[in-house]
Structures are given as C-alpha cells and as structure tokens.
Amino acid sequence: MIHLKIGKMKLDGNLVLAPMSDVTNLPFRLLCKKYGASLVYSEMVCSGGIVRRNAESMGRCLTSEDERPFGIQLLGSDAADLVNSAQILQERYNPDLFDINLGCPAQSVIKNGFGSALLKNPAMIGEIIEQLSSALDIPLTAKIRIMNSFDETLKIARIIEKSGAAAITVHGRTQKQGYSGKSSLEFIKGIKKELSIPVIANGDIYDEKTALEALEYTQCDGLMIGRAAIGNPYIFRRLSHYLSTGELLPPQAMDERLRDFYEYTALCRKYDMLGLNDLKLNAQYFTKGMDNIKSVRIEINKANDIDSVMGIIGGLE
C-alpha cells in the first residue's frame, strides 16, 4: 500500500473520499473512515456563506476527532473571501487541510463563476491558490477537471503547483461531460508525469479492477473515490485489501449493508443531523441492488416521516 504524502502530512494509505454535495456529511465520512478511507473531505462549502457565518454552511464542516485527517472543500472565486472563510473555519474546526473546488460541473455553480467555470481563468486560479496557500499553515489541495486539450489542462495544473498547492486531484472528464462518457486516464497520466506535487486520480474508479488499472496506468500517488462510495462506504475496505494483498473480498451481505445504514442513522442522531429527505436518500443508497428492492424504494419515496422510513428498512431484515 502506498502512503500518500500531502505537504508534511503522511496518510495511512492512498484512498481518498471525494467531496460530494449532500453526501459527504460527518456521519457518512465517519463510516468511510471506519472502512479504510485514508483522507475524507467535507462536501463543498461556499466561501460567501462562511464569511456571513451562515449556520447551514458552517454546519457542513462539523467534524469529530474520529475522522481525522479531515479536509474542508471551499467553493468560490474571490480570493479575499476564500482566505477569510478558510481562517474562520480553521479557528472553528481546525481541519488538517483545505481543498479548492475547480471542478464542479453543476449549472448552479458555474453560473456564479465557481467550480469548473474557473478553469477558463488560469490567472485567477493562480491568484486564489497563491493567496490561500500563503495565508494557511496547513496544506492546500485543488481538484480540477480536464480541459478539451491536454496542453490547456497541463497549463492549469502547473499554475496550481507553482502557486503553492501541496497536491492536485484530477477528474478525467471535462465540464461539458458532467458525469457522462468516460474519464480519461491518458490526461491524468500525462499530468502526473509533468508535476512534482502528488497527483490523485479521480473518475470511473468503482471496483478493484478499475482502482488497480488507474494506479498502474497513471502512476498517480492516490485515488479519489466519489460516486462508487455513495451508500457503499465498505468500498474502501475492498479496495485497500485488494491493493495491498491482491485478494478480492466477498461482497457485503445484505444484513451488513443494513447495519451500515443503521450506524449512519445513529450517527446522524448523535450529531443532530437526522432529516427526512437525507434519510430517504440514504435508505435508497444503502439498499441499492438488493433483491426485489423496487417496491421498497417506492414505499420509501412515499414515506412522510422518519419512523416510517425506519419501519420500511426494518421490514427488509
């Protein structure tokens, strides 16, 4: 197993949980950590919301000692706001590192000039990274998507490195692709070859085979797992076991998956984060692929309260 090093921080492994909006809350991150994620990131948080001390934005960064090392992903385009928000969050939550979101393809994010919209402005990216990394005494990482041409992508990656980032994650799809089509390992490999900071590969890593292929082909320092972990935190145990031993673990039994869901809900209660919509979504995620689940999913969708959702899931045991 490779030990990923970001700045002065050496991780126990090289598997990273991707920041995902409305997914990577504290309870979910704790489950991923339990199953072997080497590093977890919060869902993206808008710098403007933090500067205004918005309660919902601040709550997205809630952390616990059990999940460390832990990173907060910042979203925004104003360097001063980003620095200000990072300092506020450092004082409140003391994260181990920050990440800057330069890859989100959502229309609601792009229209504000955030996320992958920033890829069209390399000078602004350089200014943001430089100001943030200078103001922080912990590592700063950046997550990007690829551009249409390799040279354009490499130019941005080099600016990120030169401006002071300690590592970069590259999602091998363009903004236009969103989550469709195929992630380009070719672009990621090329960027890894040209940079001296750690490069983390992201996109289309969903099982042992794709994880090994991504690592061996790109020679990257680590892997970031996103959608494949939704409702499936156990993927981190499967991947870390396979990458260190070459052995495939058997799939998780249904009762084990339900136990993970119950643990998730217990953690949500503990941290006062149990909401009906989130619970319904996660009830769907954690039961995905189970036998004859379609009718159960319809019932979950119709449920009007938390007890009803828990009763439906209890009926699966």
Image (tube, helix red, strand yellow):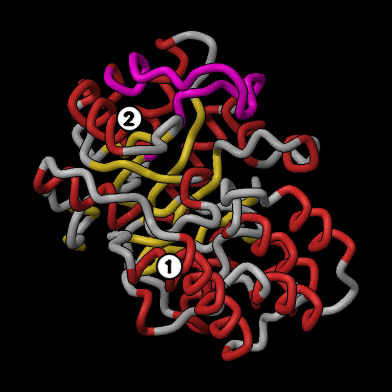
Q: Where, by quadrant of the figure, is residue 177 drawn?
A: top right
The residue identified by callout 1 is: 256
Cβ–Cβ under 8 Å for marks 1 and 2: no
Which residue is tagged 2?
Answer: 210
At horizontal 33% and vertical 46% (from top left) the residue drawn is 164
The image quarter containing residue 269 is bottom right
Dot 2 amino acid type: Thr
Question: For mark 1, does the 10 Å Cα neighbourhood hold few (<14), some (14 to 19), or many (20 or more) residues?
Answer: few
Vertical arrangement, residue 35 with respect to residue 133, above or below: below
Left or right of 57? Residue 256 is: left
Please check the rendered image and state whether residue 172 is part of the magenta-colored stretch, yes or no.
yes
Bounds of the magenta span?
169-189
Q: Position of residue 25 (x, y in %)?
A: 57, 68
Quadrant where the image shows the C terminus: bottom right
Residue sitting at x 78%, y 80%: 306
At 72% from the left edge and 67% from the top edge, which residue is drawn?
A: 278
Residue at the image point whose x is 18% and y is 62% from the top: 12
Is disc 2 surrounded by few (<14), some (14 to 19) or many (20+) residues within 10 Å? some
Foreground residue, 231 or 317? 317
Residue 44 screen position, x and y as percent: 60, 56
CA gap, disc 1 and disc 2: 24 Å
Identify the secondary structure beneath mark 1: helix
- The overriding secondary structure of the stretch rendered in magenta is loop
290 is higher (above) or lower (below) than 11: above
